[in-house]
Structures are given as structure tokens and as C-alpha cells.
Amino acid sequence: MTRASARCAVATLGFLLAIAGSASANGEEFFAPAKNGKIDLVYYGRIKDGRTGRSVTDSVYFLITDKHTGLTFPFTNDKPGHFRSPDIGTAIKEIGEQVDVKGFEVVVNVGGYKRTTITQMPRKSGGTVELDVRLEPIEPENVSAAGLKGDAAPPYGWLLLIGAVLVPIAVKWARGSRRSTTTH
């Protein structure tokens, strides 16, 4: 692990632990606002399956990157399938920079879905901004007619067939060996 990746991991963990106390959901406070109570720039929205339109309730990992300042903002969703980012505007303004949403990039990762990158952000650079995310499920790989791909394990149907043949043979052998031991 390089020093840069170690620093990133420590910063991410520290950030998540810092916001953990103020996080809740379902209409209640999700992230505490800035010290003065004013929100500069926060993204919120729903995460939905691109095919079914249903909410994604698995753990979804977001990473918003500001290319102009190099700041990254990692966060996760809550279970009902919606998210809210930390106050990005305040963090950027605290280092003396201007908020430019043209330089933002959002990467969304969740198991079972294709990794999604959003580079076209809404133009609004202040307040709360809605950003709904649609994720495309990962297609199952093509499988040959026999049900095998490469060196994959055989399908369960073959195991059942082998078991159906071997179990009666084992039972007949066990009965035969029991008879021979009782006659002595």
C-alpha cells in the first residue's frame, strides 16, 4: 500500500467516523449542517435499478471528486435507497476556493451493478440539489449450451444424477456387507 492510498484510506475512515454521530434518515437529519446552520451545496436523491425502477437498498458507495481542488467526498447511502452528500460547498469554500460544478465527478459503486460515473452535474452551485441515480445491473456472462463456461463447476443437475446412481449402489453394498457379518 502506498503512502497516498494509506492517507486516502485514513481520511475516508476519519470522515465517516466524524459524520457517524449526526447521521440518521427517513425524513430526519441525515447530515448535520455547517457550523452556522446554512447549507452551501448538498446533493441528495434516490438510487434506482435502471431496469425495474425499484430502489436499490444495498450498500452504495459514492465518491464525489472536485477536479479543480483535488478534494474528494466519500459517503454511502441509507437502506431505503436514498442518499445525501456532505456539505461540499462549505468544504470547498473553507479552503478559499470557488465552487465550480463543471469540475465535479461522481462515481457510484454497488455490488451487482455496473460502476456509474456522473460527469454532467446540475448547474446549480448552491443549496440542496437533487441528483437521482439509475444503476444498470450487470449482465450474467454467456454460458454455453451444456451449462459450462471454461473450467466452471458442473451444474447441480449432474450432481443429482450421479447421486441417484451411487446411493442405490451404496445401499445394496451396505446391506450385503451387513448380512455377511451377521452370519458368522
Image: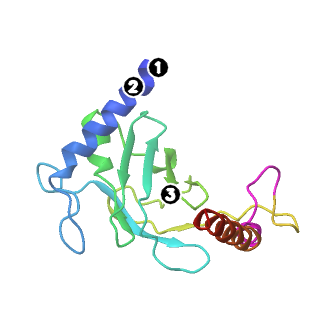
- Report x, y in % for residue 115: 58, 54
Relative image position of residue 22 (x, y in whole percent): 16, 55
Q: Residue at x 51, y 54 (%)?
A: 109
Label 1 Cα crowd, 10 Å radius (few <14 / some 14-19 / many 20+): few
The residue nearer to you, when weighing 150 against 63, is: 150
Mark 2 residue type: Ala
Region of the chain picked out in magenta, as a range: 149-163
Contact check, label 2 and label 1, Cβ < 8 Å:
yes
- Let me know if residue 129 appears in the view: no
Residue 86 visible, this orientation: yes
Q: Determine whether the residue tagged by mark 3 lies in a helix, strand or loop.
A: loop
Q: CA distance from mark 2 to mark 1?
A: 6 Å
Query: Whole-Å distance between the Cαs marked 3 and 1?
Result: 25 Å
- Which element is circle 2 on? helix
Q: Is residue 86 magenta?
A: no
Q: Is residue 92 left or right of residue 49?
A: left
Residue 168: x %, y % from top left: 72, 74
User: Quarter holding the C terminus?
Assistant: bottom right
Q: In the image, is residue 172 above or below residue 15? A: below
- State yes or no: residue 159 in magenta: yes
CA neighbours of label 3 inside 10 A, class few (<14), some (14 to 19), many (20+): some
The residue wearing badge 1 is 2
Question: Which residue lies under the disc numbered 2?
Answer: 6
Q: Amino acid at mark 3?
A: Val
28 left or right, relative to 170: left
Circle 1: element type: loop
Residue under numbered circle 3: 110
For the point 17% across and 50% down, which residue is it? 34
